Image: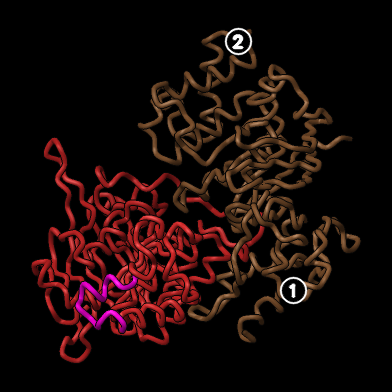
Chain colours: A red, B brown
Amino acid sequence: MKRDDTVVRPLLDLRGIGKRYPLAGGRTLHALTDVSLHVDRHETLGLVGESGCGKSTLARIAMRLVPASDGQVVFDGDDITTRPRRALAAQRARLQMVFQDPFASLNPRLTIGRALEEPLIVQGRGDRAERRERVLAMLARVGLRADVAERHPHEFSGGQRQRIAIARALMLEPDLLVCDEAVSALDVSVRAQVLNLLLELRASLGLAMLFISHDLAVVRHMSDRVAVMYLGRVVELADRDTLWRTPLHPYTQALMAAAPSPGASLRSPSTAIDGEVPSALAPPSGCHFHPRCAHATARCRSEAPALRNITGGHVVACHLV
Amino acid sequence: MTALLEVRGLKTWFDTPGGVAKAVDGVDLIVERGETLALVGESGSGKSVTAASLLRLIAPPGRIVAGEVLLDGVDLLKLDARALRAVRGGRVGMVFQDLSALNPVETLGTQIAEAVRLHAPTATRRAAWSRAVELLERVRMPSPAERARDVPHRLSGGMRQRALIALALACDPELLIADEPTTALDVTTQAQILALLAELQADAGMGLLLITHDLGVVAQVADRAAVMYAGRVVEEAGVDRLFARPQHPYTAGLIGAVALGQVTPGTRLPEIGGAVPSLLALPAGCAFAPRCERAVDACRHTRPVLQAHGASDQRSACFAPLSARVLTLVEAQPEAA
């Protein structure tokens, strides 16, 4: 895909990202292979796939929490791939993340007020009184009472903690919020509350999002465009409605068929595809999906398919499409 | 004919420093032969404690306070330890979410053969081993004879779950209790395991009690479902009916909250306000009343009993049950809010 960078500069541009982990015995684990994705301003890109597909590694690379082995991380036109940590403060403020486990991502010793104030202190924003004021305003914004500020993480339920984690991520008024399985640990009734909160904040703050989940239905609800990943590669990318109307990659089709849904045909176990996601240590040759694909040919077994543009923005990596 | 499993007035409480947590507080259930009943609820609803109570797998500070668990009319809560051991893994098999339930240092074949011999002591080692391989084949384990010689860590998550199901089937149970059997698995693997469970259940005519938090799973495999909230069953019905015409506002809320596919992407989802109450401080009346938009006075001081509100086999514990128009009502709520 060729974009005119001078006209529309994406907020986050991941170019040809690869991630290799060297292992004992001279082996290499390929966590990500040549992944190129971008997130535009005010846009939500969904990233969906099963365990080991590399979606969380990609998020961590985008956040500069782990270094990429190949490729570039470009934030708002600024290549930050190898920028030293201490020089990243400006980007860090604009790029924030919400993790799956709110129990692990909040310091148990800090009061909620202090945890929310921390990013402001680090970035040297405001005096003490101004910071407190912004903490209280943010708590109200995510639907929590002011007295929450004096309490500690253990006093809250999973849903409330996730609200707190979202509040903290928004303290610096970021442009892009990376949500990595942000609602996966929550009960369904609470999940709807948190998704509604994210929708509301996204609209009022004009946030862009990289929204990562294994749950197809959640990704569909939250995203403008969706990338499907399998064993470290993007296998399909399209705008949401196109992807659900005409999923082209056999893996995307299998994922959609396998997802349990109360609205789907009752009492008919879905047509399951065979096998499981193979180990990233020993990925199949050619197209990684070929051992589970009903349509695989000799070419699929030997040659990895490249991503090809099918119709405007609908991109798929499959020899048979 | 007596039901395969009938649970009456089951109460399992936990003594905690903060008081008595009534995790299960008066649960009634029936599982017929050849039927799949889903016990569905969110965390803390008491569904797993209910499952564990059936075979008395409750350790202090938990205790079963009251109730009957009738397997074919025999109360398991009154059996002596020896008779109970014969039922566990015998007439009643169990599959748990935790894939580490397998012994890490023994081969699958050894573990399954041991279970076979436990309940059929006359079987030779050789016969028990070939039965183990047969069971692995029945759960569609790829290359069952070879896998029988593998230790668990060599297997993928899906294969381990298949092995656990084979283990539970070792004694041809009449009732299989499966507690979140697919929660730890990837979506595509989950679909395979659910299809397998449904098939085994139909072939063997077993009763299946499936404990799950996932209404999608319920829709796919269950005949009937019982919805739990704060230690009690709030609604019970055939699955089609439950999804089409839920009576309890909590059931309707749950269905609304997962009906992502039926809501325009990016728009506000139906949600249940508030949070699950603490089991240490349950409201006097209906535990759902503080979150319920339909609550009337009675809901706040009297606990509703599970009962039929019409001619169907649907029962709900609610003073203000929803009518057939419920789904439209639930989806209309967020616009009004």
Q: Quadrant of residue A101?
A: bottom left
Residue at numbered disc 2 = B123
Position of B204 compared to A236: left or right?
right
Residues packed near mark 2 inside 10 Å, few (<14), some (14 to 19) or many (20 plus): some
Residues packed near mark 1 inside 10 Å, few (<14), some (14 to 19) or many (20 plus): some
Secondary-structure class at tag 1: helix
Residue bounds of the magenta highlight: A116-129
Could you say which is closer to the camera, residue B331 or residue A281?
A: B331
Q: In this rendering, does residue A114 appear at all?
A: yes
Could you say which is closer to the camera, residue B259 or residue B205?
A: B259
Q: Position of residue B314 (x, y in %)?
A: 82, 58
**Which residue is found at the position 28% from the left and 70% from the top?**
A118
Position of B304 compared to A146: left or right?
right
Question: In which quadrant of the rendered image does the C terminus of chain B lie?
Answer: bottom right
Q: CA distance from mark 1 to mark 2?
A: 56 Å
Asked whether residue A125 is drawn in magenta, I would say yes
Q: Position of residue B319 (x, y in %)?
A: 83, 66
Residue at the bottom extreme of this rendering: A7
Looking at the rendered structure, the kind of residue marked 1 is: Val
Residue at numbered disc 1 = B326
